[in-house]
Image (cartoon, grey):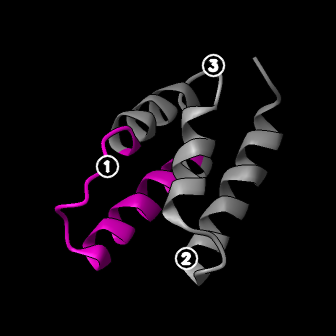
Amino acid sequence: MKNVEDLTTSAKTMHDRYASGRMDREIVRQWVMGLSMYPEPYGRHIQEAAAWFKPSRDDMDPVELKIADLARLQAIYRP
C-alpha cells in the first residue's frame, strides 16, 4: 500500500493533463492499470477505474468517452 496523498496528487495531475489534451488516453489507461491497493474509499474507485479503462471502448463517441474517463479519474482524488 502506498501513500494516499501521493495517489490523490498523481490522480489530479493525470486528470488535468488529460483534460487539457497534454496526455492521451493510453497513458492514462496504463497509469490506472498500474495502481496498487489503497485503503477505502480510494481502493473501490481505483477498481472501478481499472474496470472502466481495461477494454478499449473504441466504439464510444470520443467526447463522451473523455467525459467518462475524467469522471473516473476525479473519483480517485475526490472520493
- Quarter of the image where one finds residue 52: top left
Q: Which residues are magenta?
A: 53-76
Q: Position of residue 79 (x, y in %)?
A: 53, 44
Prevailing SS of the magenta stretch? helix
Give the foreground label among 2 and 1.
1
Q: Is residue 58 in the magenta section?
A: yes
Task: Say which element carries label 3.
Answer: loop
The residues tagged by marks 1 and 3 sit, at their Cα atoms, a distance apart of 23 Å
Amino acid on which disc 1 is placed: Ser
- Residue 60: x %, y % from top left: 19, 65
- Mark earlier in primary sequence (3, 2): 2
Label 3 Cα crowd, 10 Å radius (few <14 / some 14-19 / many 20+):
few
What residue did someone put label 1 on? 56
Viewer-side label of 1, 3 = 1
| Residue located beneath label 2 in the image | 19
Residue 39 falls in image quadrant: top right
Residue 69: x %, y % from top left: 41, 59
Residue identified by numbered label 3: 37
Indicate the secondary structure of the residue bearing disc 1. loop
Q: Residue at x 63, y 19 (%)?
A: 37
